[in-house]
Amino acid sequence: MASPALTQTVAIFRDAYRELNAKRLFWFVLAISGLVVAAIATVGLTPEGLQINLGFWNPSFPAPFNSEVLTPATFYKMMFVNLGIGIWLTWAASILALISVSGIFPDFIAGGSIELTLSKPISRLRLFFTKYIAALLFVALQVAVFTGGAFLLIGLRGGVWEPSVLLAIPIVLVFFSYLFCVCTLFGLLTRSTIASLLLTGLIWLGYWGIGTAENVVLLFDTNQSVLVEKMEEEIDSRRQTIEAIESGEASDGAASAILARMSLEARKAKLAEREEDLERARSSQGTLNRWHTGLFVAKTVLPKTSETIGLLDRFLIADEEMALFREQNQSSSDSAAETIDLGDGQSITIENQEANVDPGDSEVVERLEDEIKDRPVWWVVGTSLGFEAVILAWCAFIFCRRDF
């Protein structure tokens, strides 16, 4: 025979489900999720690029990747991560889910039903967390249906059954809980569903803003680090060239050819100028590093929405699969140096161009991706859940102490 506490908990779950299901948004989101999975299933790879398979109409489009570069399994996994998760579940579906569950506490405490529930022998703390978990399970069911469809899609169309796809369920649910805990707090404070939704949207924008700012500053910090390294290599090469000319290591003919390009004094002046440029670059690097440190600290104490969703890339897409995209985007750069043969197996490397790098450089992008990917899971999820625990403790305190 079930205990009274278990019976009460099940009853609260059932009431919460009926309340959420009555809004019909659950079925709407499920229908749209099915359409998103079906839309992804119609896209396929050809040797020329992409093809949409509609049966009666199969248009093709050129793309930077094709069936000769990516396997069907890799293609569908990336479609699932970038479109299914990155756009649908973490934006559109999350907004709809928030609309679905945002009223669970404001409606409960403002509609008079809380007095009837509290008249029963049930603790407020258990009542609060039961309703909170019921809302999360409601959202988890939506994510599970979409993820299950994607799992079948990758298996049937991609030819590979990837159990790691199912990790999207807890990852997206944790991501959503970062937002829902704040929505719950504002719902208890304002007793208004609309107000809690609007304020949660602002907080979500704040999460995104801090995370984006940290990533942008990290990009420029990484760019500056690569630039400093290249400038150091350039300056070292210039020094070696000047030393070789002054020491007479080059033969007279080769030395004349070198000096004809630029006089020795001009080379020394250019070296001094580049050394000053290097000091300025190092100073800029230090400033960027300090800004990044401040943003990183702020990001540490806040929920990390983008990084949480990005965990799917680690578990679902292998490093060699991601490298294929990097290779497609890499562009060869002209050499900033020229090597002159001095005879007798000797040579001198002369810098003809100044070392330069931009944020789109493949080396910068690769370093940035590696640094973000190397951040431990405990930092991404653990610190975010710590923030959520503080918010939920605040919510529980309000719910247990306030006279409704």
Image (cartoon, grey):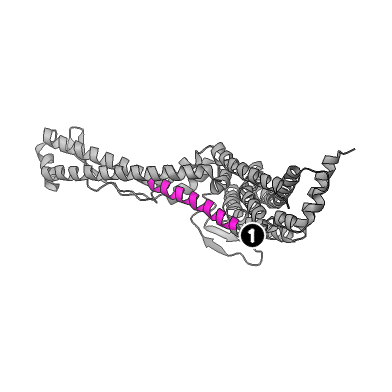
Relative to residue 1, is residue 162 drawn left or right?
left
Relative to residue 337, is residue 374 drawn left or right?
right
Relative to residue 342, is residue 6 drawn left or right?
right
Q: Which residue is mark 1?
A: 39
Location of residue 60 (image quadrant): bottom right
Find residue 155 and report its horizontal and vertical position in percent.
67, 47
Q: Could you tell me which residue is drawn at 9 percent across and 38 percent down?
A: 252
Callout 1 secondary element:
helix
Q: Could you tell me which residue is drawn at 51 percent across and 49 percent down?
A: 69
**Magenta stretch contains residue 216:** yes
Relative to residue 135, is residue 356 drawn left or right?
left
Locate the N terminus and report the quarter of the image it occupies. top right
Q: Which residues are magenta?
A: 199-221
Secondary structure mostly seen in magenta is helix
**Residue 167 appears in the rendering:** no
Q: Could you tell me which residue is drawn at 61 percent across and 56 percent down?
A: 88
* Residue at the farthest bottom position: 56
